[in-house]
Image (cartoon, grey):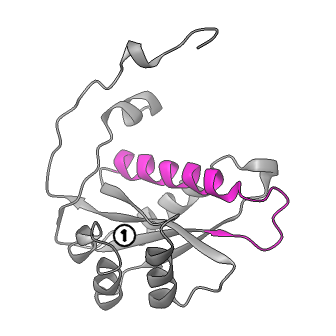
């Protein structure tokens, strides 16, 4: 699958068939995430890979939108390390780029995935910290719920010319 096809056909998938995501696929997802650009090449991302059912179910209770984790065989928690930031606050953009790369890689591997947002909701961030034992300097940006898709989402052309301004507002 070429990059443009992956971008244009990726959809948020929230239901999954039974079966694990293989270790080679997990490594590919992580490699894709770490290939993202970052401010000053600081690469502040940190990842927690979760496959244990009890932990996935506990994470599913950390947000009203995290229900897909009850059915997912894999979660990748994308976090930002804030200690030693040379570009304070840019970890959010950097980790968002890493998350999007991970989602696109999942689609290219014929996996389904959805981005579950956590930062900047302090309550949700603390719940994930508690479940995973994250240090204070590590902030969970979001969780990618990943599995073999059990649903298809329709393709929709989201381009809207009225949202584009050229040369000035």
Quarter-of-image position of residue 67: bottom left
* Disc 1, SS: loop
Image: magenta residue range: 80-109
47 lies left or right of 6: right
Q: Nearer the viewer, residue 78 or 160?
A: 160
81 lies left or right of 104: right
Principal secondary structure, stretch drawn in magenta: helix
Q: Nearer the viewer, residue 76 or 124?
A: 124
Q: Which residue is mark 1?
A: 22
Q: Residue furthest top?
A: 167
Give the residue drawn at x 36%, y 87%.
55
Up/down of 63 relative to 14, above or below: below
How many tags in the picture? 1
Give the residue drawn at x 69%, y 79%.
137
Up/down of 107 relative to 47, above or below: above
150 lies left or right of 5: left
Across and down, in percent, residue 39 comes to 76, 49
Across and down, in percent, residue 109 comes to 36, 51
Residue 105 is one of the magenta-drawn residues: yes
Q: Is residue 1 visible?
A: no
Quarter-of-image position of residue 66: bottom left
Quarter-of-image position of residue 168: top right
Across and down, in percent, residue 118 comes to 45, 66
3 lies left or right of 47: left
Across and down, in percent, residue 111 comes to 30, 55
Q: Is residue 78 visible?
A: yes
């Amino acid at each position: 699958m070429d990059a443009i096809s992956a971008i244009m056909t990726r959809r948020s998938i929230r239901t999954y068939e039974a079966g694990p995501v293989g270790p080679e696929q997990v490594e590919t997802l992580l490699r894709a995430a770490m290939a993202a650009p970052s401010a000053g090449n600081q690469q502040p991302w940190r990842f927690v890979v979760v496959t244990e059912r009890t932990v996935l179910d506990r994470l599913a209770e950390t947000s009203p939108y995290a229900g897909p984790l009850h059915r997912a065989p894999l979660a990748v928690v994308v976090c930002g390390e804030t200690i030693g930031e040379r570009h304070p606050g840019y970890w959010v953009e950097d980790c968002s780029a890493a998350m999007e790369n991970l989602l696109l890689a999942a689609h290219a591997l014929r996996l389904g995935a959805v981005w579950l947002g956590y930062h900047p909701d302090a309550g949700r961030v603390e719940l994930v910290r508690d479940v995973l034992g994250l240090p204070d300097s590590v902030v969970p940006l979001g969780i990618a719920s990943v599995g073999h898709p059990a649903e298809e989402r329709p393709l929709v052309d989201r381009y809207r010319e009225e949202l584009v301004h050229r040369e000035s507002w």
